[in-house]
Image (spheres, coloured by chain):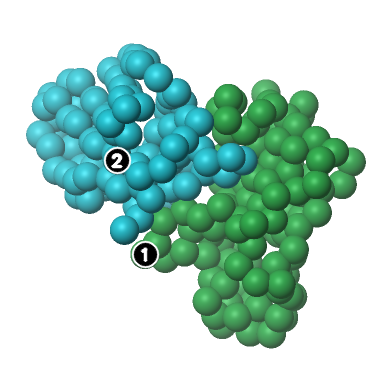
Chain colours: A cyan, B green
Amino acid sequence: KNEVEQSPQNLTAQEGEFITINCSYSVGISALHWLQQHPGGGIVSLFMLSSGKKKHGRLIATINIQEKHSSLHITASHPRDSAVYICAVMRGNKLVFGAGTILRVKS
Amino acid sequence: GAGVSQSPSNKVTEKGKDVELRCDPISGHTALYWYRQSLGQGLEFLIYFQGNSAPDKSGLPSDRFSAERTGGSVSTLTIQRTQQEDSAVYLCASSIGLAYTDTQYFGPGTRLTVL
């Protein structure tokens, strides 16, 4: 079992839909990151969380340390949100990555 | 300002050759990371540099892989005697300071193909 599990692996949504991507991890961590990777490879850091909730525009990230679980929500989804979303946990000095969720938003 | 840059963007080499990949972090960032993303697999950590401290090399897959960071800035990842399984996108990232508190900024990556 991977240390970081994401679900779903693939997600297709209609423009405007509310989207949730989940991340569960099995070990103690110091922080959790949500990353976005567009076709072509560029990776952008969306959030870094150690507790609670963060919001940036249409994106919301939450983390429950006790349950070892985080969610990334996208409100009013748009085709430009189509990308791979990657959860990564900070263990010591290094990031341990989930396999990613491939999101496609159709217009 | 300039982001993290990597060179070359693409590298094709023959099995058994050595390759060097370069990373220029954001100016002033003390932490630098190398990651690898293989086809069909997720990202994996390779090595971490923080200031003048000894690097964390725990993610390097074999002794054919090495990295150095000169003057606390530019970093070079060297792969000796390349193998086909080394084919991947090699990503560099940097952050201002402590790994667990700061956002990491990723470079565009170097796509390595070993024939």
The number of callouts visible is 2
Q: Is residue B95 left or right of residue A52?
A: right
Residue type highlighted by circle 2? Ser
**Subunit ID for the residue under disc 1:** B
**Alpha carbons under labels 2 and 1: distance apart:** 21 Å
Q: Is residue B44 left or right of residue A2?
A: right
Q: Residues within 10 Å of mark 1 (few under 14, many from 20)?
A: few
* Whether residue A27 is visible: yes
Place of residue B57 in the rendered image (x, y in percent of width and height, measured from the top left): 69, 56
**Subunit ID for the residue under disc 2:** A
Place of residue A22 in the rendered image (x, y in percent of width and height, measured from the top left): 24, 37
Q: Residue at x 28, y 45 (%)?
A: A6
Q: Residues within 10 Å of mark 2 (few under 14, many from 20)?
A: many
Identify the image quadrant of the C terminus of chain B: bottom right
Q: Residue at x 24, y 26 (%)?
A: A73
Place of residue A34 in the rendered image (x, y in percent of width and height, measured from the top left): 40, 33
Contact (CB < 8 A) between labels 2 and 1?
Answer: no
Identify the image quadrant of the N terminus of chain B: top right
Q: Secondary structure at mark 2?
A: strand
Residue type highlighted by circle 1? Gly
Numbered circle sitting on residue A24 = 2
Place of residue A45 in the rendered image (x, y in percent of width and height, measured from the top left): 47, 32
Q: Residue at x 38, y 50 (%)?
A: A3
- Placement of A71 over or under A76, stated as above or below: below
Q: What residue would you read off at disc 1? A: B40
Q: Secondary structure at mark 1?
A: loop
Q: Residue at x 71, y 72 (%)?
A: B63
- Placement of A49 over or under A97, stated as above or below: above
Q: Is residue A1 left or right of residue B41?
A: left
